[in-house]
Image: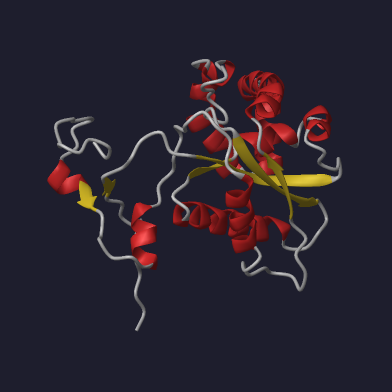
Amino acid sequence: MAVCNTKSVFANGLKYEEDFFEFSKEDDFFSLLEHRRSVRRFKPKALAKDEIDKILHGLSHAPHGDSHHHVELTVINSREKIMEALPLMSQFYDKLAKWLHNPFMRTMIKLKKGKDTINTLQNHLLPRIEKGIYKEFTYEYDGITRGAHSLIIFHAHKNSEEHKEDSYILVTYATLAAQALGLGSTIIGLVPAALNKSNELKSMFNIPLDHDVVVSLILGYPKYKYHRGIKRKLKNIHWIN
């Protein structure tokens, strides 16, 4: 519905008038926010290096929590290299499904990662693993990196200050920089989870074994043009005057 320029496609009981908004014609920051969305279908080509360089330059202006940046970036601009890693990532998610069905392992994950994480794994990730979504990968598309030819991984030494918070700030800046260049992007948590459990994967991407991989971003040229955005509401707003 966001793509159809004639408003002739309908899905999931959504209505154009109630659930979507037309993009602003203004050329400002708030229009940029309106247009930004998670893009998971890309044209089959890697980004031009100068476009990635512009995104990286944008990240150099991001704020950070500690007095020095500790976060390092690994840029993979090759579909072939990404595909080399996909089977190992898929194997990790097969193992994760077995752990989640094991009461002892499930308890250990809950104690180490928290109840919120175990809820996410069981309610969101496990059904997708069991549907085989992460086992399907071709050159054109896969369920983990969505067929992207370009991938940025944010990582830092596991003991470095503020590295998780700074990684999320950086990846958010990267999504906005990509949008400003007319590119598509999506923040992906599947890649870091697999890398942190596999030294082989870290070595494949030349990431130090003592680094914590926090988040990753898939990037590319969007396959589809979006004509409108979908309305989203904040959970709640509490005012204190």
Image quadrant in which the C terminus is located: bottom left
Task: Indicate left or right for 11 with 170 as reference.
Answer: left
Q: Is residue 168 visible?
A: no
Where on the picture, by quarter, is residue 15?
A: top left
Could you tell me residue 233's position as x and y percent? 30, 55
Q: Is residue 94 left or right of residue 143?
A: right
Counting from the top left corner in percent of width and height, residue 44 is at 51, 28
Q: Residue at x 36, y 35 (%)?
A: 224
Kindly identify the residue that appears in the image at 65 percent across and 18 percent down.
94
Q: Kindly identify the residue that appears in the image at 31 percent across and 51 percent down.
A: 232
- Note whether 226 is above or below 164 in the view shown: above
The colour scheme used here is secondary structure
Number of disc labels: 0
Q: Position of 86 compared to 177: left or right?
A: right
Any part of residue 63 in sight:
yes
Q: Left or right of 51: which side holds 214?
A: right
> x and y percent of residue 99 in the render?
67, 23
Residue with the most extreme bottom position = 241
Position of the N terminus by quadrant: top left
Seen from the viewer's position, the closer of residues 184 and 207 is 184
Report x, y in % for residue 38: 44, 43
At 70% from the left edge and 31% from the top edge, which residue is drawn?
194
Q: Residue 130, relative to residue 44: is it above or below?
A: above
> Image quarter for residue 75?
top right
